[in-house]
């Protein structure tokens, strides 16, 4: 979901694993998976570019909604 939504923005959006410091390009599913961020890991969202603020809002909303996990389990 992160990679899909980030492709809507011109800004560079990255996730950083708070434990390891590794970063991932949010447009790449493989990059995101390579972070090794298991459930409970603190991650930081970083964005630069003209629509960075909007990108951060959208991706933050995904995390806050737990990626609609509860809806999918129904």
Image (spheres, grey):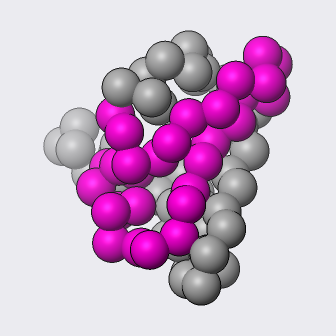
Q: Quadrant of residue 7?
A: bottom left
Image location (x, y in percent) of residue 29: 34, 34
Who is closer to the viewer here, 35 or 58? 35
Q: Is residue 42 left or right of residue 38?
A: right
Q: Which residues are magenta?
A: 1-29
Image location (x, y in percent) of residue 40: 67, 25
Who is closer to the viewer here, 65 or 8? 8
Query: Residue at image x 79%, y 24%?
Result: 21
Q: Is residue 57 left or right of residue 19?
A: left
Q: Is residue 49 left or right of residue 11?
A: right
Image location (x, y in percent) of residue 1: 32, 49
Quick check: can you spot residue 67?
Answer: no
Query: Residue at image x 56%, y 57%?
Result: 13
Image location (x, y in percent) of residue 34: 49, 18
Q: Is residue 27 magenta?
A: yes
Who is closer to the viewer here, 42 or 35? 35
Q: Quadrant of residue 28?
A: top left
Query: Residue at image x 51%, y 42%?
Result: 25
Query: Residue at image x 62%, y 75%?
Result: 49
Image quarter in which the C terminus is found: top left
């Amino acid at each position: 979901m992160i990679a899909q939504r980030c492709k809507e923005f011109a800004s560079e959006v990255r996730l950083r694993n708070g434990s390891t410091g590794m970063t991932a390009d949010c447009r790449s599913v493989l990059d995101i998976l390579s972070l090794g961020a298991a459930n409970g890991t603190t991650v930081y969202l970083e964005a630069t570019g003209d629509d960075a603020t909007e990108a951060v809002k959208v991706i933050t909303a995904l995390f806050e909604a737990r990626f609609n996990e509860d809806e999918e389990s129904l």
